[in-house]
Image (cartoon, rainbow, N blue to C red):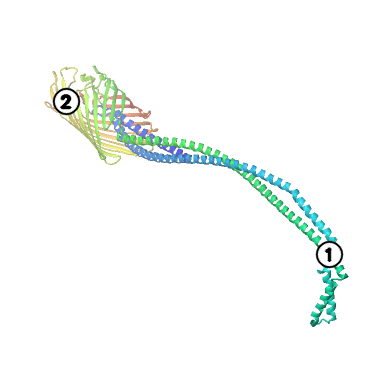
Amino acid sequence: MRMSRVKRRRLNLQRRRERMHCRKKAAAALLTGLAAGAPLRADAVTLNVLQDIYGDFDYMENNLANIRAFDLAKEYVGEAAKNAALAQSYLEEAEGICREAAGNLRMAEENRQQAEEQVRLTAEELQRTRAERIRLTEQAVASQQAVADYLPVWYEAQAELQQRLDVQQAAALERPAEAAAAEDGGLSLRERQRAEWIEAAWEEAGFENSRLPELEMRFAASAAAGSTGDGADGLSEAQAAIDAYWARMEQLEAEADAAREYFDSVSERLDELKEQCQEAEEAEADCRRDVLELETELARNKQDVLDCQQDVAICQNEQAEANKACFQALLERNDSFEAVIEAKASLLHLGDGSGAQNRLGYYSWQGAAAGHQLYDAYSCYWAGYGRELSISNAYVYSHTGLADGEMSGLTDTTVSAMYTNKHPVYDVRYGLDVNLPTGESRMHDNAVVPDYLAPYGSLGEGWNFTPRLEVARHVDKYTAWTWRSAYAFRGSYANSWDDPASVVHPGSIWSNELEYLHTDEARQYMVKLQYTKNSRSSMTGAVNNYSFTEGDGMAGRGYFRSWFTKLDSWAVYSAWSYDRAAAYDDAAMGGAGVHRLYYGGGWFHRFDDRRQLRLFANWLRAEGAAYDPLTRQSYSSGRRFSVSLGYDWRLDDRNSLSLDVERAVMRQQGDANYRGWGVMMSYNRSF
């Protein structure tokens, strides 16, 4: 029963571990989506729906996924600790069962030895009893034979006694009359005659007592005289016959007594022999019963030996099973302790890992000019021990539909490093972004793609170094304030295709952002406030030689998402931005700046834990005019409306795929109207 209980507990422990590993895999899957879901951001003034808007919604979803992963990791630690305690208790119980099984085995072996010893003793006792029974049987037979041999003596003594009694009886029948009479009166003949004389004389005297002496003297004289006469002779003969008779009878009586005494002694001896025979027979019968009892006891003891041997075999199997269970419990205890260490390490290094992302996008438009852009962007990342490292690049091919409007090649490569110092309330992150000039910076003005048509307006710049600082304060489990600040040191580069000597010396950029984020299981909302400060820039060359300051920028964004069913949620967003026009040192400001208002709404439908569909409608309204001499892009008033459809599919715990399609209509001041399509497919892989 106890072994069955250990097996049940082992199955319970295995099921708990399976649930624990499922939580661990779920946390890993959530972190996979979090690490691989950060969108690539283009350096553009206009917000891109497929990248920026969707990216912010993904950012909120990933933050919730991070919370879930953290909860699962903590639950994983707690479950691992419980499993470790349970495994330790199982080990202690298994060790107790093992000790009990060893004790049972020792007891069974002792019982077997005792049973074997009892069999030996019983067999020896049976052997002695059988020998005693043989002896007693022989003794009983000898006693019976002695009785049988002595019976003739008894019969002979009995016959002798009977003969003596018969002779005595026959002699008694031949006795004389006087003897019979004397025997009848109890007096002899002479005594009877004298009594008659005395009675007659007493009668004559008249029965007087005074004459009694006289009568005695006379009777004495008469007796003396009579003893010498003829009467005396007759009396003597009769008395002689009587005396002879009684002498004969006394002799016969003596002989009969001797025969009787001999018969009694013979009978006594016969009784002794019979008693000895009976005692021998009873002793033999008792010994025979003892033999039967010992034979029964020996058979029972042999069965006890077999039972003890079976018990020993059972105890040996139980001990082997107990040792196996104890060893298994020891392994499970060690595995549980390792799982606790692993769970704590997983919680400590939550989000650590590596992965890669690839995005393939295609945009096309028709209007004042028909163009398209195809790009293949890829990035890799590594995170561990509070440190993060990533590298990203892209290949772009585009054509604006204008003369010399083709642009193709690699973009600049961005290398980012980040260190996070976590605290219970505040998290501080230190980062550095380095822009490697791997892309071509010189290009024709007609090849510049407006950022409201496609994500990439140019291929490259110069060396840029951007240190960053982020401070996050966790209000509670679902709410946090985050302040971000970055200062970009930008290096010079050549940008003009027409003027090879033209070099741009861009100024530094200091940007700040304040974010409020709340994400729980029922709703998500986020507000961002941004401010960008630009320093003085200059451009030198054969044709252009002037200085300017890019306009400062301000922006605000708001996002809200709420679930109205378990699988469905609706979302809205709104954003406002203002970018001042660039100020030239030797000329008036180029424009008054541009105000932009973004708003939109959509619907998310989750088919299951792996698949999600989203549908959005997006509006943009821009007012004002400006020109950016660095990007060589012009901005003016306009309207933009688009409908976007997206599908997310998490293939497994390490792979995910998403596809987004957007149809847009744009109207700009000066009848610069466009209609376009945008398609983006993203693949994420976690290592």
Query: Where residue 398 sits: x, y (%)?
Result: 27, 20
Quarter of the figure with the C terminus: top left
Residue 664 visible somewhere in the drawing: yes
Q: Nearer the viewer, residue 260 or 600?
A: 260
Residue 388 figure quarter:
top left
Going by the numbered disc 2, the residue's amino acid type is Pro
Q: On the image, numbered disc 1 is attached to which residue?
A: 240
Query: Where residue 523 sits: x, y (%)?
Result: 33, 39
Q: Nearer the viewer, residue 130 or 106?
A: 130
Q: Earlier in the sequence, mark 2 or mark 1?
A: 1
Q: What label sits on residue 506 in the rendered view?
A: 2
Q: What label sits on residue 152 in the rendered view?
A: none
Alpha carbon distance from label 2 to label 1: 194 Å
Disc 2 residue crowd, few under 14, some 14–19, many 20+, Cα 10 Å? many
Residue 354 figure quarter:
top left
**Image side of residue 374 versus residue 318, left or right:** left
Q: Residue at x 43, y 39 (%)?
A: 94
Disc 1 residue crowd, few under 14, some 14–19, many 20+, Cα 10 Å? few
**Image side of residue 203 versus residue 102, left or right:** right
- Residue furthest to the left in view is 586
Residue 171 figure quarter:
bottom right
**Above or below: residue 108 compared with residue 270:** above
Q: Nearer the viewer, residue 353 or 408?
A: 353
Going by the numbered disc 1, the residue's amino acid type is Ala
